Amino acid sequence: MAVSICYEELSPLELEQIIKTSGLIYLPLGTLEWHSKHLPFGLDAFVSYELCKRACMITGGCVMPPLYFGTDREHEINGKIYHGMDAKAGEILPGSLYFLPQDVFFTMLKQIVKNVEEQGFKKLAIVSAHSGTAQQNTLEDLMKEPRTTLAVHIFPGRTFVGAIDHAGPIETSLMLAINESLVHMNRIAEPMGPIIGENLQTASKEEGLERIEKIVNQIVITLQEK
């Protein structure tokens, strides 16, 4: 029987073999965040998890469960503090539970890196489909941290092939490719609220699969080169 690539399903002997061979572990980062009326709250995590699993099938290694928490910039509007797309809307949007202060998010990631290194892994690939500026900056700060035996690689959403939007045609296409049962295209004619990206009608499963393949290839090439 094939060994699982999902970390939580591994036994100690299986984990030891992975560390001895590829020495590679993936960490998918996502959110529980409003993605308009037609997409699920967990979209960012679904995307990053799918990318990690597909890349892992090529490179070997294992994949940690996705984190559904991240960070975003804070904006003061009329005396109230809003984060991310809430600031764009000027109100608290339903479903957004992901926000952590930037220093808290950094500390959490730093500790995860330490734990991974102590287990004996040689490479950690962090894939984030949440592309808020504060999230990207935190990941870049993490790369500057000194370490001895572990190489850390980050793949933030804004560096994906073709970049990424928010609840627009790109994310809609990606979600259609991952699990089309969670996409409600019949709702895109309704008032959508704030999104980044236009022409949602152009979204397709085929476009999503093509983008996923390109991003996975980008991740695999980077990891194999370093």
Image (tube, rainbow, N blue to C red):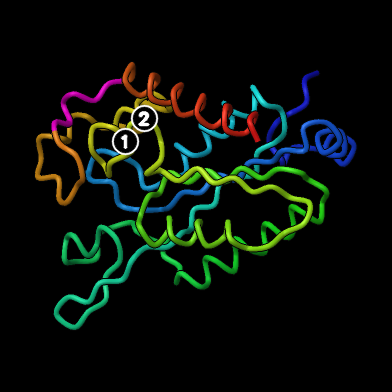
Mark 1 residue type: Glu
Taking the spot 77% from the left edge, 20% from the top edge, the residue there is 2
In the rendered image, residue 54, in percent from the top left (x then y), is placed at 57, 26
- Residue closest to the eye, 163 or 104: 163
- Look at the image and say whether residue 13 sits in the magenta stretch: no
Q: Secondary structure at mark 1?
A: helix
- Residue closest to the eye, 160 or 171: 160
- For the record, the magenta segment spans 199-204
Judge whether 145 appears above or below 155 on screen: below
In the rendered image, residue 86, in percent from the top left (x then y), is placed at 24, 62
Task: Judge left or right: residue 131 versus residue 191.
Answer: right
The residue that label 1 is drawn on is 171
Mark 2 residue type: Leu
Corner quadrant of residue 118: bottom right
Number of labels in the image equals 2
Taking the spot 83% from the left edge, 48% from the top edge, the residue there is 120
Task: Judge left or right: residue 122 versus residue 189.
Answer: right
Corner quadrant of residue 84: bottom left
Taking the spot 33% from the left edge, 31% from the top edge, the residue there is 162
How much space separates mark 2 and mark 1, taking CA atoms? Answer: 5 Å
- Look at the image and say whether residue 201 sits in the magenta stretch: yes
Corner quadrant of residue 145: bottom right
In the rendered image, residue 189, in percent from the top left (x then y), is placed at 10, 35
The residue that label 2 is drawn on is 174
Tell me the crowding category of disc 1: few under 14, some 14 to 19, or many 20 or more residues within 10 angstroms, Cα based.
many
- Residue closest to the eye, 110 or 100: 110
Position of the C terminus, as image quadrant, is top right
Task: Judge left or right: residue 20 versus residue 158.
Answer: right
Tell me the crowding category of disc 2: few under 14, some 14 to 19, or many 20 or more residues within 10 angstroms, Cα based.
many
Judge whether 128 appears above or below 83 on screen: above
- Contact, mark 2 vs mark 1 (Cβ under 8 Å): yes
Q: Secondary structure at mark 2?
A: helix
